Image: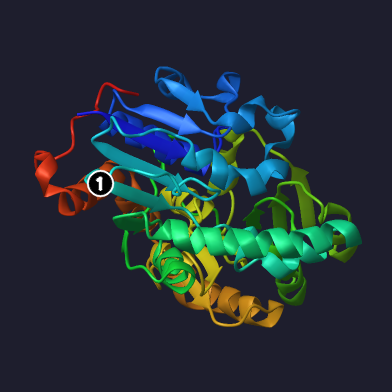
Amino acid sequence: MRVAIIHYWLVGMRGGERVLEQLCLMFPDADIYTHVCDREKLSPLLRRHTIRETFIARLPGARKHYQKYLPLMPYALEQLDLSSYDLVLSSESGPAKGVICNPDTPHLCYTHSPMRYIWDQYHAYRAGLNWPMRMLWTVVSHKLRIWDVAAANRVDRYVANSSFVARRVMRCWGRESDVVHPPVDLEAYRPAPAPGPDAPYLFLSELVPYKRADLAIEACKLLGRRLKIVGSGSEMERLKKLAGPGVEFLGRVPDGEMRALYHSCRALLFPGVEDFGIVPLEAMACGRPVLAYGRGGALDTVKEGVSGLLFDAQTAESLAEAMRRFETEMEPGLDPERVAAHAQSFGPEQFRAGMWSAIRRMAPELGLPEAPPAVAQAA
């Protein structure tokens, strides 16, 4: 069986590329198609596959400025000849699903998110442009939305990475989705005893407005609690001015040091809205609960009273109240092993099993066995 996997662009190893790795483990002979590829930044697992680029990669400056060619990507996808493949899988966050397949070739799309910059984040993205680019983007994004809805009908089955994204797929494209959570590699994380009430809280994220680090700072100031902030970004200077003496900015921290930071915190504060959110599960795997705003992917990952608490309003006061509840109701009897056990249900094996089941339901004519191939030696 010949399998093609379409991924928007391959310029690093983030959550979308970790999903791609798992698809490649399921189909080790699959060919990968993408708009732009930087092989030096890919894992050995991905580099073992045949990777073909669209014509976007041959345009001037595309290696660095590929996103500026977004209006041409629909045309590039439609030039790909996939007529020789028996199964097509697309990985959608940028334009990927809009390929043209044979009528009898099943096409499943794993959706990290409909393109944010033309849908739910359109106004925020547009507001950040200068006047000429804003006028241009108004026209281009309108045409992209029309194409995006048309391209959505080329897909046989959708799988969303969270219930939150499944609702957005329905709103944007009018299509139902299965939900299969993305694979979170938790092998490096183990639970440790709780550090006690003198330990700081932790915020870990890129410091950009929608992550709402300001709410974590304000809530800790209200309660007089210590806070460590890991990450950097455009909000850094504003947040430093907002912070009090109990807030420590650590900048970017190597992955190898993150486990110690998780172990040394009372809980992770997660006040933003994410499509899914891998950081909360890493914290849980270390036995640390998560206090999260009750929207987005946190609704799928935070189990109330077991792996953390949810707060209702995206305000510092609401987060502070959740911290009070945590300290009085949950922290005294906290079992780090129980928190970590909850996180383990979001591993790579569960992802592969869920995807395999979705493919079999979509295309029984392929005759796939009931279970995905064993990949114990692939890592």
In this picture, is 212 found above or below 234?
Answer: below
Q: Local crowd at mark 1 within 10 Å, few (<14), some, or many (≥20)?
A: many
Left or right of 189? Residue 108 is left
In this picture, is 280 found above or below 370?
Answer: below
Residue sitting nearer the eye, 83 or 191: 83
**Image x and y of residue 359, in percent:** 22, 48
**Residue 342 sits in quarter:** bottom left
Which part of the image, by quadrant, shows the C terminus?
top left
Q: Residue drawn at (63%, 44%), measured in percent from left and top?
A: 72
**Image x and y of residue 84, in percent:** 28, 29
**Residue 213 sits in quarter:** bottom right
Q: Residue drawn at (51%, 73%), measured in percent from left and top?
A: 295
Left or right of 166? Residue 140 is right
**Image x and y of residue 196, in percent:** 55, 58
Q: Residue drawn at (59%, 24%), measured in percent from left and top?
A: 41
In this picture, is 184 found above or below 309?
Answer: above
Residue sitting nearer the eye, 238 or 129: 129
Residue 140, visible in the rendered structure? yes
Residue sitting nearer the eye, 179 or 106: 106
Which part of the image, by quadrant, shows the N terminus?
top left
Residue sitting nearer the eye, 162 or 67: 67
Residue 198, visible in the rendered structure? no
Left or right of 29? Residue 191 is right
Q: Residue drawn at (57%, 27%), measured in percent from left and top?
A: 37
In this picture, is 236 found above or below 379?
Answer: below
**Residue 115 sits in quarter:** bottom right
Task: Quickly name the residue at label 1.
Answer: 106
Q: Secondary structure at mark 1?
A: loop
Residue type highlighted by circle 1: Pro
Left or right of 142? Residue 245 is right
Question: Please, which colouring scheme is shown?
Answer: rainbow
**Image x and y of residue 318, in percent:** 63, 81
